Amino acid sequence: MPKYKIAIVGAGPAGYFTAQALQNSATDDLAFDIDMIERLPTPWGLVRSGVAPDHPKIKTVAKVFEKVASEPGFRLFGNVELGTHIQLEDLTSRYDAVVMCTGSSIGKKLGIPGEELPNSLSAAEFVPWYNGHPDFASLKVDLSGSTAVVIGAGNVAMDCARMLAVEAHELDTTDTADHALDTLHNSNIHKVFIAGRRGPEFAAFTAPELRDLPKLEHTNVYINAEEVEAAHARAEAAGEIEKHLASNLEAMRLIAESEKSENRKSLEFLFSHKPKEIIGKDKVEGIIFETPEGDKTVLCDLVISAIGYHSLLINGLTFDNGRIANLDGRVVGTNIYTVGWAKRGPSGVIGTNKSDASDVVKILVEELGEPKNAGDIKDVLHPEHAVIDQAAWSRINAAEVAAGEALGKPRRKEVSIEKLVRLGSGS
């Protein structure tokens, strides 16, 4: 029976769903050994470092990932960075196929004056900061001012705004990183705006996320009801309103009509606000928007842009519009494939990666030739380099969960790579 070796680079949802699709493709006549390579000591990608801490149900998909990892023939190589500890050629020469599931981690720029001012941040920095990503643990986030503006009209923008607008004690029982929780407890931010460039009908929020907003106990949420009605009329005039848009507009209408109380904190949506310039002397002091009524200045102390992501460049691969150049997941002329945001750009939800992985794996399996049997990746890695395998990750996971239980949290994340490696070794 032929047995093929597949390398998956990136241990996020796209990587695990690719491994699952390969495992599901195995038959009596076809078998796979799967090596998953991840630059951090911790797997799970955006499920760990991207999903908002106050949405724990979404993180339960990690149970699926752990089941995939427990299957025979699966190996985890955490704390192994492509381009540093191994090269792409090391993989393509040793594996029958290499699947790039490296995501999109670089925040897109607004491209306006003042964007480089202190306290002008990208969601690609802010989200991993509050989620305990080691690369962003030391990010300077100044919440001493009263007002924040989040630019973007998708769920990432909403997550950023909500994290700023909730009372910090509501996050005490979540896995928000300790350093972020300390900062949020000392925050003076009490007014948060979400600014979208176009009207409500073009927003990329999802209805369940919108419906959760009026449930915030200590935060008033505002949407202009007339703008929602006008958006509905425009959408109706353009033809039959699609189901997801109808759900979105209905959720927005419910927010507009929701009862407001004497809460100190507020979150307000601004539509048809195109950012023109961030102003300030030594740090952010405000932002100028272009609106249908003319330019409008919103005084603020923090700006977070959440307008999309593009992929980090990888030597040996061509990139097109922020993603790996590919044809239906194939990197043409190679034994490389790609799944997830690295393939299609930052679109869809976590579950979208499952169907994406299934489609690409079907192509991969069809294109397999004779097995290579060309050595092991361990031959390339320095013998003293601390690789985090599945057993080591299980020790890290158990230690974080135990530390969290003592505090009434699902886990207490360690943000130091050195300490994570020590936990993995059992010391």
Image (spheres, rainbow, N blue to C red):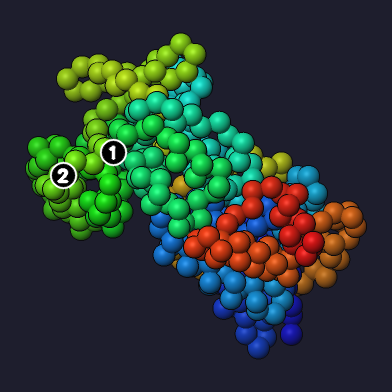
**In the image: residue 253, left or right of residue 372:** left
Identify the residue shown where x is 30% and y is 33%: 191
Residue 265's disc is: 1
**In the image: residue 79, left or right of residue 262:** right
- At label 2, counting other C-alpha atoms closer than 10 Å, the crowd grade (few under 14, some 14-19, many 20 or more) is some
Amino acid residing under circle 1: Lys
Q: Nearer the viewer, residue 35 or 355?
A: 35
Q: Nearer the viewer, residue 309 or 63?
A: 63
Q: Position of residue 105 (x, y in %)?
A: 56, 43
Amino acid residing under circle 2: Lys
- At label 1, counting other C-alpha atoms closer than 10 Å, the crowd grade (few under 14, some 14-19, many 20 or more) is some
Identify the residue shown where x is 57% and y is 78%: 24
Residue 117's disc is: none
**In the image: residue 189, left or right of residue 353:** left
Q: Does residue 296 lie above or below 257 as drawn?
A: above
Q: Nearer the viewer, residue 396 or 26?
A: 396
Q: Does residue 53 lie above or below 104 as drawn?
A: below
Q: Nearer the viewer, residue 231 or 26?
A: 231
> Which quadrant of the view contains residue 242?
bottom left
Residue 260's disc is: 2
Dot 1 falls on a residue whose secondary structure is: strand
Can see residue 170? yes
